[in-house]
Image (cartoon, coloured by chain):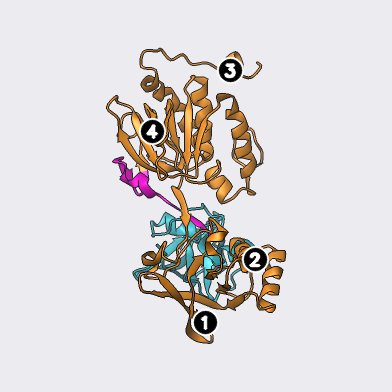
Amino acid sequence: MLKTIETDIIIVGAGPVGLFAVFEAGLLKMRCHLIDALPHPGGQLMEIYPKKPIYDIPGCPSVLAGDLVKNLMEQILPFNPGFTLGERAEKIEKLDDGRWCVTTSQGTRHHAPVIFIAGGLGCFEPRKPPISNIEHFEDKGVEYFVRNPEFFKDRRVVIAGGGDSALDWTIYLADVTQNLTLVHRRTEFRGAPDSVEKVMELAEKGRIRLITNAQVTGLQGNGKLDGVVIQHDTEGTFSIETDFFVPLFGLTPKLGPIAEWSLSLEKGAIEVNTLDYSTNQPGIYAIGDINTYPGKLKLILCGFHEATLACQSAFKHVRPDQKLSFKYTTVTGIEGLPL
Amino acid sequence: MKENIKITVIDRDDQRHELDAPTDMGMSIMELCKAYELPVEGTCGGMALCASCHVYVLNDYALPEPSDDELAMLDQAFFVQDNSRLGCQLKIKEEYDGLEVKLAPVAQ
């Protein structure tokens, strides 16, 4: 039997807006559980720009994106939110008792009367090279992640890419694989200098094959990958035999399953009522970069505001028999913290 | 107020769009394309972190050299050529009057 998590508000997306919603819900004594496809909280702030300073958070002249996430995690700690990380929210269903059920890619079920969709740009998925039949070979020799290095033990592997993850995995897998080829579009690498040096050294010693100024442009195999076609800038096209092709070109956000959730969308964003950021489905709200309304600005600070109003509105779904009373933190403090 | 310049953007269906571009707003080519509702996502907001504003520069202009961030991003992008740039990193200046760029294909 797979796990079922019960809570008051399921928050899809653990970026800054999803995290802050936990705080505002907590003030109203509503419990939250966050789901994120990434293995850590913070969303695009952690995934794309953790070291970039943000200058428009009220009261913070400058804060690094990574530090903002750290501070938000500290701010919501008293409310003890639950997390389902590294699993993508896949499906939404209405339960017989009127609550919602969100099921993840790994089958974890979450039940609650309210869902906040704080999905930002969507789910981060690997950038797929434009090779026409690449999807045909996924899980049949094409791997976009190195989940378990042992998977490649004594096999032939071709890695493509020039960034840190391509370099790091080349160094690591050089010892594990039977033979390893790294293909990069240019001569220079932009990864960490000592990783670049190590890769060059491995190539000189003949431990790996390094092919620069080249791209993988085709995949071969009958049902299962057995070779890749490489196009070299000056030496033309040739193919090499391999068991695996691992393109490592970073991650890019995709809206993903959210598009299938019967919510009204406009240009890939969820339409909301600005009274409370509710969607066309009662009990489902959309906050932050994922929503759209006249005058929408994709700013973290606007997302915080949206989360706050959505919590006030969500209260009537979570505690239909209670009256909501609005309180200032300066007056009441925060439960669990000394005033 | 400074005069606007003309920048030509060729979209992915080879349609030419001659755009009026202000030079006094610190606007980038990516933002210009978005303002004219051309199919440029600008997902990362202009931080050279997504390559959704990847363009080919078609004529010879003394554009500033790409930063390390831009080069690193182009390393992860596809359909990259010698004249590839990220539109978000090209801030519109008076000297660019007559510049022509073509939107690069989008990988799925």
Dot 2 falls on which chain? A
Marks 3/1: CA–CA distance: 63 Å
Does A194 appear in magenta? Answer: no
- Nearer the camera: disc 3 or disc 4: 3
The residue marked by circle 4 belongs to what chain?
A: A
Q: Position of residue A269 (x, y in %)?
A: 37, 45
Say the numbered circle drawn on residue A285.
4
Do labels 3 and 2 touch, CB within 8 Å? no
Quick one: label 3 or label 4, which is nearer the N terminus?
Answer: 4
Q: Which residue is mark 3?
A: A335
Q: Dot 4: what SS? A: strand
In space, the residues marked 3 and 4 are separated at their CA atoms by: 25 Å
When the figure is inspected, residue A150 is found, relative to residue B101, above or below; the finding is above
Q: Quadrant of the C terminus of chain B?
A: bottom left
Query: What residue would you read off at disc 2?
Result: A171
Residue A95 point in image, percent of width and height: 30, 30
Q: Residue furthest left?
A: A96
Q: Residue at x 51, y 58 (%)?
A: A145
Which type of secondary structure does the marked residue at label 3 adopt? loop
Q: Colour of chain A?
A: orange
Does label 3 or label 2 sit earlier along the sequence? 2
Chain part drawn in magenta: A249-269
- What is the number of the mark on residue A21? none
